[in-house]
Amino acid sequence: MLGERSRSLEDRIADGIPDLEGPMLRAGVSFRDAAEETLRLLRGTTSALRRPVLVSEDGLRTAAPAFILREGRSLVIRDVRLAHRPETRRDNRVRLAFAGWLARELTGLDVARLELVNGLGERIVVELGPQESDAELARLAGRALELLGDAPEPDLLLSHSHCQHCEHYVHCWDRAEAERRIEVMPAVTRARAGLLHEEGVRTFDELAARAPESFRHRDLRGHARVLLEEARAFATGAPVWLREPTLPRNRTPVWFDVEGDADGERAEVPVYLWGLAVERAGSGPLDFEPILADLTPEGDRDAWVRFTSRALEVFRDHPGAVWVHWHAAEPMWLERYIARLGAPAEFVRAVRAQGALFDLHRELARSVRLPLRSTSIKFVAPWLGFAWSNPDADAAWSAAQLHRARETADAAERARLLSEVARYNADDLAAMRVVWRWLEARRD
């Protein structure tokens, strides 16, 4: 989905560039042939190039920016990124500077400017610093070649939230868990990992054996309790309870989860599914009530009206009902939609009443430490035995289904895709119910 958005943005930029050749890198053309064509056009013409391929004389360094443009006898290197502030990321600046470095080396021409077009279509002139100097680029290229040779694998384990979308995630994190490294613990930030290493602690078993007063650094002393509790959970593979859970008693739970567009409030339909299920007596399956929006501004408003109407019925039928959600997205979107589209005064009073909304994730974090690399519902519920009906489904998958539903002209296919999103949302609600009942059993 992101790839399609990136290509669409690049197409729009290309439409505004005169005398544009390419793309050089395209179906049916080898990388080597694309590089030769790029070099021929750069040396023999004044054309702008789309998807050029730059390869150093030794064949070891390559770059493929979105565009190389002309400004007199100088070059302009322009790349495209979906982020709104791509220039703030060092990897984007290095990639752009590296392309300019190779272009100068291959053509002998000056590079007048480096540019990034962001996800809003804005052109940004990138100013380079010491971290993108020619000497630093040479050092980075040399280090890359070392790693492709016999150099030891670098130790770059970061936080789980940072690493989980990396293509090497399974390799790094599974090995780190097998080696019982402190970095797999959510409470061990990258900075704290360095501090713990300085104090001779590398495994969560070693950390679990420490006493709070044994730490020298004040940050470790200040966070000793959470670090040691979490380390004991990892070392034993069992939960470490901090207190008894304080779940609302004698109130009807309403399981509540929304599915939102990755573009947030910039999207025509920021929330495309309002999912709820009112708890019934017994232990049977939930009676899931998905409220899906047609993917238009009118459909957005209609879904919100239907949701507020159904929510008011629930509040009236179940006085004191508690709407259980996971983390902060649901309260945030309720407030944003109240501000965007308005809502009945009775609904606003009900959702803003003290205790009407209950963050189950926050209660879990206050009550117990778990031997899990993340406290996402996608980790906690499976640890308790729950399985999603589609094991590949997650928030990114849901957003991709929405994107495909928007793109298709086939009404039946659109309905099928949105029904898959609804099934995923229903599983999220059932997963929360499993965690709730586990905490409830501990409380009781």
Image (cartoon, helix red, strand yellow):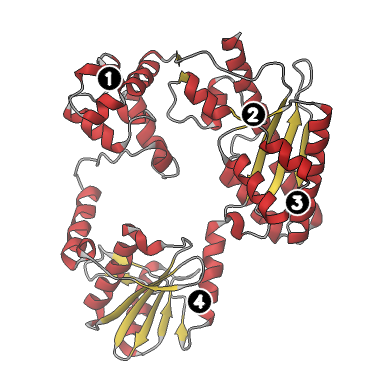
Tag 1 or tag 2, which sits nearer the N-term? 1
For image coordinates 75% across by 24% down, the residue present is: 279
Numbered marks: total:
4
> Can see residue 423?
no
User: Which quadrant of the figure has residue 309?
Assistant: top right
CA separation in Å, label 1 and label 3: 49 Å
User: Which quadrant of the figure has residue 34?
Assistant: bottom left
> Where's residue 413, x and y in %?
76, 52
- List the residue tagged with mark 1: 207
Q: Is residue 305 above or below residue 14?
A: above
> Where's residue 58, x and y in %?
21, 67
Tag 1 or tag 4, which sits nearer the N-term? 4
> Where's residue 131, x and y in %?
22, 61
Q: Is residue 46 left or right of residue 282?
A: left
Tag 4 or tag 2, which sits nearer the N-term? 4
As drawn, the label of residue 355 is 2
CA separation in Å, label 3 and label 4: 31 Å
Question: What type is the residue that disc 3 sits on?
Answer: Ala
- List the residue tagged with mark 3: 293
Q: Is residue 295 left or right of residue 357?
A: right
Question: What type is the residue that disc 2 sits on?
Answer: Gly
Number of the front mark, 2 or 4: 2
> Can see residue 110?
yes
Number of the front mark, 3 or 2: 2
User: Which quadrant of the figure has residue 245?
Assistant: top right
